[in-house]
Image (cartoon, rainbow, N blue to C red):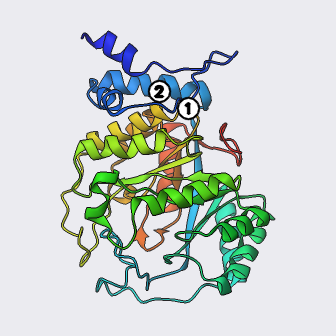
């Protein structure tokens, strides 16, 4: 099969609307996704950029800020995380933050250019006693005119409906990797547990933010599997963070071999083709990326980043550095609620 035929077959999208835009499809199989990974780099990026321009302004990138509202002491054993109580990483556990401090942080984030405020708690699942505070955080941030996002672990149906009633825009719950490789990273919950919470969030009418982490020792076939899981959800996640593993000392993945930057860009590009209407976030790991790598990611279809000096408990580029990169690349912030697939 020649390259042009491969491009045509591997990227054939269905359900074209009146505007001639490629609509998401939900029947991708592994062979088709692998064919995308196998494309010559230039062909893959060209196709990804073509899809990207159908739904998004190619020079707009959403700025989000992520705050740890409850740090450390998590009973899960995620091999990449320094917040797990299973590992001696020196990170002290903290209680749930006061609502007032969370809102103050959101105001600072908005002033710095963030349109989405993400709040994360190191929990397996929220306790009933904490939900009133969590709801107040959502309501307070929403009153600022920002998109709201929470990541609190697994949810019950009752908790999900409370978050919906509070006006939560997005709930983050990453699948992390392929179903086959998942048990190598986490043993305290299953892949089905993750999908169950995503299903509850979708049923409640909350936008889903779900992606994964690459560079955890997985094979390319695991990246294929992860993207198959995400792209075959119906609806697809409205937000898809692709994280590059940040190696943390004394965690099981602390000595993992870093992923090659070109392989990382390929993952971004394939995610963009598979999920054309989703915001694809260039997430954790940017601190270790060159401007050139980040620029390739934006060209490949990434159109969201986290700003601020920390992502929960890991380093992130300084705001001035990001602003300089935006100026150099001619990028501008994406306004709130600009994602075409947002509920």
Going from N to C along the chain, the mark reached first, 2 or 1, is 2
Say whether residue 113 is visible: no
Could you say which quadrant of the image residue 107 lies in?
bottom right
Dot 1, crowdedness within 10 Å: few (<14), some or many (≥20)?
some
Tell whether label 1 touches label 2 (CB within 8 Å): yes
- Vertical placement of 219 versus 183: above or below? above
Say whether residue 262 is visible: yes
Q: Residue at x 66, y 66 (%)?
A: 157
Find numbered disc 2 in the image and state the secondary structure of the residue it sits on.
Answer: helix
Identify the residue position indicated by label 2 in the image.
49
- Vertical placement of 146 versus 232: above or below? below
User: From the image, which quarter does the N terminus lie in?
Assistant: top left
User: From the image, which quarter does the C terminus lie in?
Assistant: top right
Q: Nearer the viewer, residue 223 or 334?
A: 223
- Direction from residue 122 to residue 157 in the image, left or right: right
Could you say which quadrant of the image residue 204 lies in?
bottom right
Nearer the observer, disc 2 or disc 1? 2
Q: Nearer the viewer, residue 158 or 110?
A: 158
- Direction from residue 218 to residue 278 in the image, left or right: right
Measured as percent of width and height from the top left, residue 309 is found at 48, 68
Q: Nearer the viewer, residue 92 or 121?
A: 121
Find numbered disc 1 in the image and state the secondary structure of the residue it sits on.
Answer: loop
Measured as percent of width and height from the top left, residue 302 is found at 48, 41
Q: Gap in Å between the C-alphas at discs 2 and 1?
A: 8 Å
Q: Residue at x 25, y 63 (%)?
A: 184
Q: Residue at x 49, y 53 (%)?
A: 322
Name the disc covering residue 58, or none.
1
Measured as percent of width and height from the top left, residue 336 is found at 70, 49
- Vertical placement of 46 versus 274: above or below? above
């Amino acid at each position: 099969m020649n390259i042009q035929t491969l491009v045509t077959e591997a990227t054939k999208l269905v359900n074209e609307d009146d505007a001639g835009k490629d609509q998401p499809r939900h029947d991708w199989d592994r062979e088709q996704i692998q064919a995308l990974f196998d494309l010559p780099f230039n062909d893959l990026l060209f196709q990804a950029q073509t899809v990207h321009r159908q739904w998004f302004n190619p020079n707009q990138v959403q700025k989000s800020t992520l705050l740890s509202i409850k740090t450390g002491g998590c009973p899960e054993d995620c091999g990449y995380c320094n917040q797990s109580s299973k590992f001696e990483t020196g990170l002290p556990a903290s209680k749930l933050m006061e609502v007032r401090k969370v809102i103050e942080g959101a105001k600072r984030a908005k002033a710095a250019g963030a349109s989405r405020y993400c709040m994360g708690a190191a929990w397996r699942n929220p306790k009933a006693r904490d939900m009133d505070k969590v709801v107040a955080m959502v309501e307070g941030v929403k009153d600022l005119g920002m998109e709201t996002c929470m990541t609190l672990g697994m949810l019950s149906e009752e908790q999900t409906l409370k978050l919906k009633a509070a006006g939560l825009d997005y709930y983050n719950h990453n699948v992390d990797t392929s179903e086959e490789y998942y048990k190598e990273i986490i043993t305290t919950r299953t892949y089905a547990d993750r999908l169950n919470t995503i299903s509850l969030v979708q049923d409640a009418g909350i936008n889903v933010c779900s992606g994964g982490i690459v560079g955890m020792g997985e094979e390319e076939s695991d990246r294929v599997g992860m993207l198959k899981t995400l792209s075959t959800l119906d609806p697809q996640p409205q937000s898809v963070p692709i994280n590059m593993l940040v190696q943390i000392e004394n965690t099981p993945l602390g000595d993992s071999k870093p992923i090659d930057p070109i392989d990382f860009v390929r993952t971004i590009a394939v995610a963009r083709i598979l999920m054309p209407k989703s915001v694809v976030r260039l997430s954790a790991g940017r601190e270790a990326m060159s401007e050139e790598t980040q620029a390739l990611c934006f060209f490949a279809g990434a159109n969201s980043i986290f700003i601020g000096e920390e992502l929960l408990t890991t380093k992130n580029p300084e705001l001035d550095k990001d602003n300089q990169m935006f100026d150099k690349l001619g990028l501008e912030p994406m306004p709130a609620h600009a994602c075409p697939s947002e509920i």
